[in-house]
Image (cartoon, coloured by chain):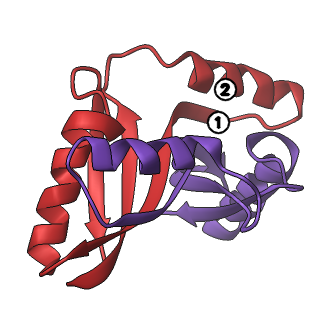
Chain colours: A purple, B red
Amino acid sequence: MTKFDAVVNVLLKPGISDPQGQTIERALPALGYEGVQGVRVGKHIELSVEASSEEEAYARIQEMCERLLANPVIESYEVTVS
Amino acid sequence: MTKFDAVVNVLLKPGISDPQGQTIERALPALGYEGVQGVRVGKHIELSVEASSEEEAYARIQEMCERLLANPVIESYEVTVS
């Protein structure tokens, strides 16, 4: 078994309202930062997982995303294994 | 002014307790995923910013991180501009 480091980025799907992103977008001009658009806030998850191959690690993390790390109804995710 | 897309990843600094990560780490074995360690949960922020150069966009986003997007006392951040 080898240990693989992985990064998972979880974002709300396009069209799903993102109140945290909207709040940041409204707050920035008040701080003097104009011209900022399309702010979307998601989760950045780092973890290390034991697996016999990079493919297996990737597959297991995909499964964890579907079952725990993301809500696949409203969120999309991106897994990077290194 | 050109529009630059950027990604900001915000993570708790090493040594700062991460209850969300700990909860995920404890929940995974119960779902059948053994061998997962070092789970850290942070924020993944996507945004687009108007600036006259990539360097200026990068500098402005760094400043936004210091002032709004991250808490530099307990969080570190990583900015990628494309």
* Residue B25 badge: 2
Residue under label 1, please give it: B36
- Nearer the observer, A61 or A52: A61
Mark nearer the N terminus (2 vs 1) = 2
**In the visual, does B60 lie left or right of A30?**
left
- Nearer the observer, A41 or A67: A41
Name the residue rendered at 57%, 15% in the picture.
Answer: B19
Q: Is residue A45 visible?
A: no
- Vertical position of residue B19 compared to residue B10: above or below: above
Quadrant housing the N terminus of chain B: bottom left
Q: x, y (%) of residue B21?
A: 58, 26
Count of marks overlaid on the render: 2
Name the residue rendered at 78%, 24% in the picture.
Answer: B27
* Residue A71 badge: none
Which amino acid lies under the numbered mark 2 shown in the image of this protein? Glu
Chain ID of residue with mark 1: B
Q: x, y (%) of residue B49?
A: 31, 69
**In the visual, does A18 lie left or right of A65?**
left
Marks 1 and 2: in contact by CB < 8 Å?
Answer: yes
State how far apart marks 2 and 1 are (Cα): 7 Å
Which of the two marks, 2 or 1, is nearer to us in this view? 2
